[in-house]
């Protein structure tokens, strides 16, 4: 059975450019903190990668602090700041904030005091894109980086969170982006690495892969690759709607990530859909990868006003370059057949 991967928001396939850069970095012997020639070579590789990632983010002049991923970056950015956020935020951010902000039915979050708030640029489950206000304290840029054209320096936020594996880099490496002058309290102590903000010898192999993936992602974005992805996503959206099962396409009509489709199928639990489609050869999810293993209704959809049953009947389909029109139509056919059987058992 040929498998079809439709869960790019959980993690994107490793880019060949990232793999090649990581293999090359394995040959670099030194510790970036050492002063001898080998250490200087490792430091040079690290700093080149830091500049590459800053350029890809449009964050020239900002500080790039390497972390183990966006979750650690969120802890660095949010801990102890007394921030507020909405329930649509990823758990990695929400755990540090008071989830007090209202969410509009469109999934948009109005902010009265951006300086005390965290607000994602794009939601991993629905794909809904926010307008970030000037002076925003923290923004989770993880899902948008590499899929949407933006520059950190234009966004108006003080800190941003990014992760390599969402754009085809390796897992286990990410970064916190800081405007110059922003102070953070280190969570990892014991060394002076990363400008004293994150102790521990840097993951040089992961950093090299991250930089290569970021550069490749920017080339794809400039070449219009994600516009082509959006066309395939729209074909999938239309194909599922044409089945006439009273499904709900969440966020349709609003700005969304080009690859993301969140669908509510009344009467069919999201987790059951995931299992059925896995058996049919399709990898999908019932929410963000960090929570999809837990059988509960989507907190994001509940915040948008969907009731508990509807929020528990949603799936997320997230595609990427290389997913074809034929792939998504094949999925729609398999999903439609299974859903028809579920509906027939309930009548």
Image (spheres, rainbow, N blue to C red):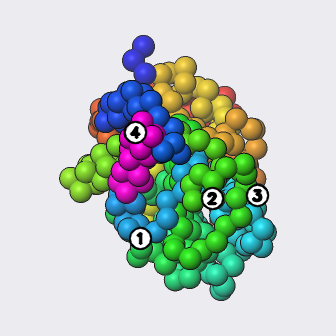
Report the front residue among 304 and 176: 176
Q: Is residue 118 above or below residue 19?
A: below
Residue 56: percent from left, percent from top: 35, 58
Q: Earlier in the sequence, mark 2 or mark 1?
A: 1
Q: Which residue is mark 2?
A: 196
Q: Nearer the viewer, mark 3 or mark 4?
A: 4
The secondary element bearing badge 1 is classed as loop
Residue 11: percent from left, percent from top: 50, 39
The secondary element bearing badge 3 is classed as loop
Q: Is residue 52 above or below residue 341?
A: below
Tell me, yes or no, if residue 134 can be seen here.
yes
Compared across the picture, whether 37 is left or right of 81 comes to left
**Residue at the spot 63% in from the left edge and 58% down from the top edge:** 197
**Residue at the spot 51% in from the left edge and 73% down from the top edge:** 179
Question: Do the residues under discs 1 and 4 have CB atoms within 8 angstroms?
Answer: no
Q: Nearer the viewer, mark 3 or mark 2?
A: 2
Which class describes the residues within 10 Å of circle 1: few (<14), some (14-19), or many (20+)? few
Residue 203: percent from left, percent from top: 53, 39
Q: Quadrant of the N terminus?
A: top left
Residue located farthest toward the top when viewing the structure as drawn: 1
Q: Earlier in the sequence, mark 3 or mark 4?
A: 4
Q: Which residue is mark 3?
A: 95
Q: Earlier in the sequence, mark 4 or mark 2?
A: 4
Tell me, yes or no, if residue 105 can be seen here.
no
Q: Is residue 37 magenta?
A: yes
Q: Which residues are magenta?
A: 36-52
The secondary element bearing badge 2 is classed as helix
Q: Which residue is mark 4?
A: 37
């Amino acid at each position: 059975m040929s498998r079809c991967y439709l869960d790019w928001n959980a993690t994107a396939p490793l880019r060949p450019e990232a793999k090649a850069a990581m293999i090359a970095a394995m040959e670099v012997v030194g510790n970036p903190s050492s002063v001898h020639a080998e250490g200087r070579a490792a430091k040079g590789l690290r700093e080149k990668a830091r500049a590459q990632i800053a350029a890809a983010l449009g964050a020239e002049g900002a500080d790039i602090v390497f972390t183990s991923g966006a979750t650690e970056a969120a802890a660095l950015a949010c801990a102890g700041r007394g921030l507020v956020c909405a329930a649509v935020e990823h758990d990695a951010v929400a755990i540090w904030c008071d989830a007090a902000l209202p969410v509009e039915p469109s999934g948009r979050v109005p902010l009265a005091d951006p300086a005390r708030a965290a607000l994602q640029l794009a939601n991993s489950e629905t794909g809904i894109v926010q307008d970030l206000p000037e002076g925003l304290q923290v923004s989770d840029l993880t899902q948008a980086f590499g899929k949407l054209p933006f520059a950190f320096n234009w966004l108006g936020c003080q800190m941003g969170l990014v992760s390599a594996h969402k754009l085809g880099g390796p897992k286990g490496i990410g970064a916190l982006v800081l405007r110059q002058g922003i102070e953070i309290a280190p969570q990892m102590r014991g060394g002076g690495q990363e400008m004293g903000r994150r102790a521990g010898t840097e993951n040089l192999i992961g950093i090299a892969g991250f930089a290569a993936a970021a550069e490749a992602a920017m080339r794809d974005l400039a070449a219009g690759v994600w516009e082509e992805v959006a066309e395939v996503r729209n074909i999938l959206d239309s194909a599922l709607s044409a089945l006439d099962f009273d499904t709900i396409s969440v966020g349709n009509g609003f700005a969304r990530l080009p690859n993301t489709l969140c669908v509510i199928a009344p009467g069919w639990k999201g987790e059951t859909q995931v299992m059925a489609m896995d058996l049919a050869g399709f990898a999908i999810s019932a929410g963000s990868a960090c929570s999809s293993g837990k059988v509960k209704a989507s907190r994001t959809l509940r915040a948008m006003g969907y009731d508990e049953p509807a929020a528990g009947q949603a799936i997320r389909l997230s595609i990427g370059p290389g997913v074809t029109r034929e792939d998504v139509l094949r999925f729609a056919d398999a999903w439609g057949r299974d859903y028809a059987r579920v509906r027939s058992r309930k009548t």
